[in-house]
Structures are given as structure tokens and as C-alpha cells.
Amino acid sequence: MTTIPKKELTLADVREQLAKSSIYSEKKRRRMDNSFKAIWRYTGLQLEKIPATMAGLSDVVNKIEPAAHGVGRPTIINMRNHIMHAMKQTGAVPELQEYRERRPPLSPMWALFAQRLTTRHSKTMAWSLMHFANARGLAPRDIDDAQLTLLSEHLRATSPRPNQYGLVRQIVLNWNRLRLQMPDLDLKELTPPPARTRRLPFALADFPQSFQDSVGGYRQWLVQEDVFDDDAKERKVAASTADNYIRRIHRCASHLANSGVAVSCFTDLRVLVEVEHFKTVLRQLQANDKSAQQTETFHSAITLLQVAGWLKCPKDHLDKLVKLKNKVPRPGMTMTDKNKKLVSQFDDPAVLQRLLDAPKRIWETLARDKRLGARTRLAQAQAALGLSILTFMPLRLGNLTDLKFGEHLILHPGGASSLIIPAEDTKARRPIEFNIPEPLATMLFEYYTDIAPAAIGTRPDSLFCRTDGAPKGFAQVRYLVQTYFKQQVGFHMNPHAFRHLCAKLILDRNPGAHTLVQELLGHKSVETSTAFYSGLNSRRAGAHHQTLISEFLANQPPAPFNRRRKIGR
């Protein structure tokens, strides 16, 4: 085994040592060298810029989207594996000496433990922990939080799998479940990592109970059903909208507490609308607002003003708050630069074609691959249907998540199927009705009668449901759509951006058809559609102008041929 001198190793060093190695055949070495060329071709990064560590390699490889380069996932995996072989051979990552080597057999105690695992999921989640402990001579009862920390470090150094944090969390949760199922083994309970890193320094539960009660009272006022109550809101809001308001209040309270105001001072919501505190909150929000138009800061200020009105603050106090709020710029009614760049990628016909073909490709995988588990088949079918619905009928994600068979999806095999959402379920209080295209209706009917019942045991009520039949949540559906979109098309796109894409496609073909966009997207007025998508008009106007110039030049008669006479000397 060749050894590289100790320094800050990069993939360029590994490739150089690979060229000098005589262990591999010329054919094998050429394949491995092509993998180093491919990583530069797919990422644009020089090998000298990529550290020769598993973390450095994984950070680069996991960002490569095969669909964007016209290759399959196995191609990227083979490229990564070749580079890992080279890193092992050159000694760049000592932990990789066990890579692709035969693992020692499990000890009798661990073999008995493995035999008691009944589900595929529990076996998969316990596999890394079992072999890690077995190689170090540990018994199941020896596993504790200290060993879990060592396992986490080992996985980071040797495993190319993305989201190591989530993997370790799933291993711990699985272990704690097995602990309850096998009480005779006297297994220790492990401390699971938090589901996600807390983004705010203070949780809502950290504040006094009186403050939490005040927040609950405000939320109750937002969604109150009794319109005849003396303090009733003129127009109640949906529960999801009320939850967004509460999240903004939580963010404001957390920023205020982080600025130095003692948590014990938060007796109720009045602490947030004191003039000086209101000013402090706006400063903190602006400092942390990453949006181009300071959208979150503006809407949080509006929410706090509404809270002040609910608390019946005096008029002079409200005037001072309004004066401060007016210093926050109002976001414009237009697409952000980020979304403009996103939808502009569909100017490439190949990108648009990948999106249009994605549902069909996913559906064909379901029919072709019989090894898929019930949960995976259900998720893939829902992803295909979600992408197809958003492409043909650009719903808001909340409406997409809530779709139910027989209530919103009316299927008529061999006839006209419909998607109907009543006005009270939409943001703009306008009903949404679409005829479902025949290929999509066929997929929906197959999902309703065959695919979903095979996974959950009965025909589903909700389009997006779990294997126990319960409906999936907003975040689960968003993650599902985003994940499969990225796999099939090659870049990240939020489901709401499908609405921008549909508007762009209509206006590219019919400039000025903002009324059609209004009806498709369900805007309250055509002014909303015109204002929001007016930023795309300059590109269309420029394209139209360039076409006129090209046509003018094409219609010009050729210049007369002027043959110059040669004059002899």
C-alpha cells in the first residue's frame, strides 16, 4: 500500500498517487481515473479544491443531481465508489481500510439479537450499530450514549450516506423500540438527537404560562366560530393561517428575549407591543430576515399591530406603533429574483421535457420493479400524482395536501373526471374546478383501486395518506414532491413555484393573457396577476422586438454585387 506524505490531502493528490500505483490493472486504473474526471465534469470543481476525506467527498457528490446531467443514479454511485477505492488504496482515509472488506462474523450474542429482528426496517437500522459494536467486542447491553457518539464519528469518517444526523437519530429510535420489545436483554435507553436543530433560541414553552395563555387566547380569537360574539373578528382565518401568526409571535418573543429582556417579564402579549420592545423586535427581525424584500419583517409587524388592536391598546399608542411599522418597506407584488431565475430554467426545452416526463417515468418504475416495499410504492405513486397534478392544475400546496377522493377528486373511468375545490377551502374564496386529463385520471383510478389498497388494506379517503390510512401533513407532501422533482428534473423547486411556472408558460405563448392566468391560479382580481407577473413582460417584449428585427433583416434585398476592376501595374 502506497502512503501519501502527511499534509492537507486533496483528490488531486489521490489521483496522482493512483497513477503511480501498480496494484490495479491498467483497465481498472483507467476507470478509476475517469471517475476523477467525471467529478470535475459534474461539479465544475477542481480536484485541488476537494478535500480527500469522506465528509469532503460526500458534500460534493451528494449535491450532484443525475437528471441534470442526463445520467442515472448508479453512474454517480459508481463514480463515488471508484474514488473511495482510490482513497483507501492511497491511505488518505485510514478508516476506509475496512471498506469493501469482509466483515467478521457476528458473535453468538449479536447473531441471536439479529435473529429476533422481525421487520426489514429494524434490521436495516440496527445493521451499522451491530457490526460497529461486534468489531469492538461489545455486547448489546454495553451500548450507551458514549458508544453512540463513537458510532456517529465512525459513520462520518467512513459512510458516504447523506444526512448522517438523521441516520443516527433513526438508529437510536429503532434501538429504543427494540429495548422495549426485548426486556430480557437489559438494553440501555439511548438519548435520541433532536428531530431538528432549534432555529430560535427560546421555545414557546420557555415563557411563563400566562404568556402562553395569552397567545392561546389570541389564536382562539382568530379562528372563533361565533360571529355574534361582541369581540368576534370580522373575518375568521383558517387554522393553518392562525398557526402562521402564532409562529410569527413566537419568533418575535424569542428575538426580544434574546436581546436581553428577561423571560419572567413576558406576562402576556402586551410585552411585545410596548413601543421600545416593538422597535427592538423590528430591528432583530430585519437583522435576521434573509428574504430579498424583508417580507417576514413586514408581515410580523402587521401581526403585532393586530395583536395590539386585539389587546385594545389606546389610539395614541397604536399611532406610535403604526409610525414604526411604516418604516419597514412594503414588499412589492412581484416575483422574487430567486423565483424568476428558477422558472427561467424552463426556457430550456429539455428541462421542461424532463418535468413533463417525470410522472410517467416514476409510474413505469412502479410497474417494472416488483421488489419495492409497500411504503416506497405508496410514496412513489403519490409523488407521480403530485407532480402531474401540479403541472396540469397548479394548486396551492394546502389544497393539494387536502385532496380527498369522492369530495375533491371525482373519478369516472372512461368518462370525464373532475377536480373540484369549493370556495370556502381556497385562499381567495373562489371555487376551483378542473377537468382531469385522461392519462392523469387513469393513474388516479389505478392508485385508488390497486396501489393504495395494497399498501393500506383499503381504498384511501385522502390522496396523500400514510400506510396506516391517516392523511399526510403539509410538510410531508412538500418534502415528497420536492424530493422526486429533484431526482427527476435535476434541481430544487418548491411546489408553490409550479404556479409561477404555469403563469410563465401561458404568458410566453400568449403575452398579455393575464385574465387567463387569473382564472387558472384563482387570484381575486386580474390586477393581482398583472402586478405579480409583470416582471416577466420585459423578456417577452425583448424577444418580440428581436423577432421583428430578424424578420426585417430577412426581408431586405441582397446588396448589389460591386466587382472591382483589377488595375495592372
Image (spheres, rainbow, N blue to C red):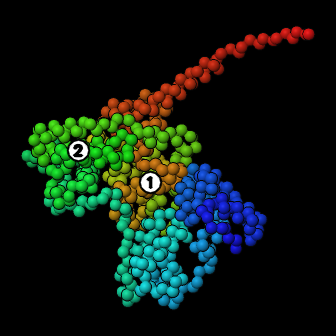
Choose the circle earlier in sequence order: 1 or 2. 2
**Circle 2 Cα neighbour tier, 10 Å, few/some/many (<14 / 14–19 / ≥20):** some
Quadrant where the image shows the C terminus: top right
Amino acid type, residue under disc 1 in the picture: Val
Depth check: give the residue in front, 232 or 27.
Answer: 27
Q: Which quadrant of the rendered structure holds the N terminus?
A: bottom right
The residue at 47%/28% (across/down) is 538
Q: Nearer the viewer, residue 303 or 475?
A: 303
Looking at the image, is 538 positioned above or below residue 110?
above
In screen coordinates, is 271 left or right of 187? left
Task: Describe the element under mark 1 as helix, strand or loop.
Answer: helix
Q: Is residue 551 above or below residue 46?
A: above
To which quarter of the image does residue 74 belong?
A: bottom right
Residue annotated with mark 1: 481
Mark 2 residue element: helix
Residue 335 point in image, percent of width and height = 40, 38
Residue that numbered label 2 is attached to: 279
**Which kind of residue does numbered mark 2 sit on?**
Lys
Do the residues bearing badges 1 and 2 touch, measured as CB atoms within 8 Å? no
Residue 392 is left or right of residue 565, and the answer is left
